[in-house]
Amino acid sequence: MNRLIKGLEQCGSAIAAVCLVCMMLLVGADAVARYALGSPIPWVMETVSYYLMVACAYLAASDTFRHSDHIRLDLVVDHMSPSLRVGTAIFHTALAGLVFGIVAYASAVNLVQAWEEREY
């Protein structure tokens, strides 16, 4: 099971990397089109902000946490006792789970409303 999860994490990171490259190319092409040709590409900003940026953040998150590459403040943590470190890690994990749960719930409500209104 751990091999499957690790493979999915690596796959997500690879897709996130492709999305990042696509973002750079699209924003660069849009800038050239806007300033050199005077006509921006109309769908670029929506595609980048609604899809590619979200994919980069969420698809790479799990692999980032596995390798402890996420941004954290070690200045305070280094001076804590081991038991306090475990306690704060549990608290922060529970808090993050709560926040992600709220986001998931709000997204599900939004999805149901859009589905009922036949939004595209």
Image (spheres, rainbow, N blue to C red):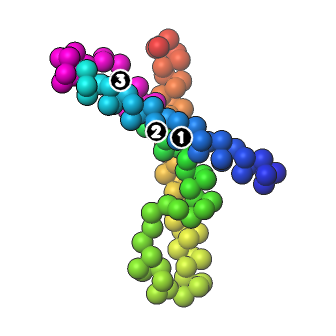
Q: Which residues are magenta?
A: 34-51
**Alpha carbon separation for disc pair 2 and 3:** 14 Å
Residue at image mark 2:
20
Residue appearing at x 45%, y 31% in the figure: 22
Residue at image mark 3:
44
Label 2 near label 1: C-beta < 8 Å? yes
Q: Mark 2 or mark 3, which has the lower sequence index? A: 2
Residue appearing at x 46%, y 14% in the figure: 119
Q: Point out residue 120 in the picture as x, y percentages from the top left corner.
A: 47, 14
Asked which quadrant contains residue 65, the reply is: bottom right
Q: Residues within 10 Å of mark 3 (few under 14, many from 20)?
A: some
Residue appearing at x 17%, y 17% in the figure: 38
Name the foreground residue: 110 vs 6: 6
The image's mark for residue 120 is none
Q: Point out residue 37 in the picture as x, y percentages from the top left corner.
A: 20, 17
Residue at image mark 1:
16
Asked which quadrant contains residue 24, the reply is: top left
Q: Secondary structure at mark 3?
A: helix
Q: Amino acid at mark 3?
A: Val
**Is 81 on the left-hand or right-hand side of 48?**
right
Q: Residues within 10 Å of mark 2 (few under 14, many from 20)?
A: some
Q: Amino acid at mark 2?
A: Leu
Label 1 near label 3: C-beta < 8 Å? no
* 50 falls in the magenta region: yes
**Alpha carbon separation for disc pair 3 and 1:** 17 Å
Q: Secondary structure at mark 2?
A: helix
Q: Mark 3 or mark 1, which has the lower sequence index? A: 1
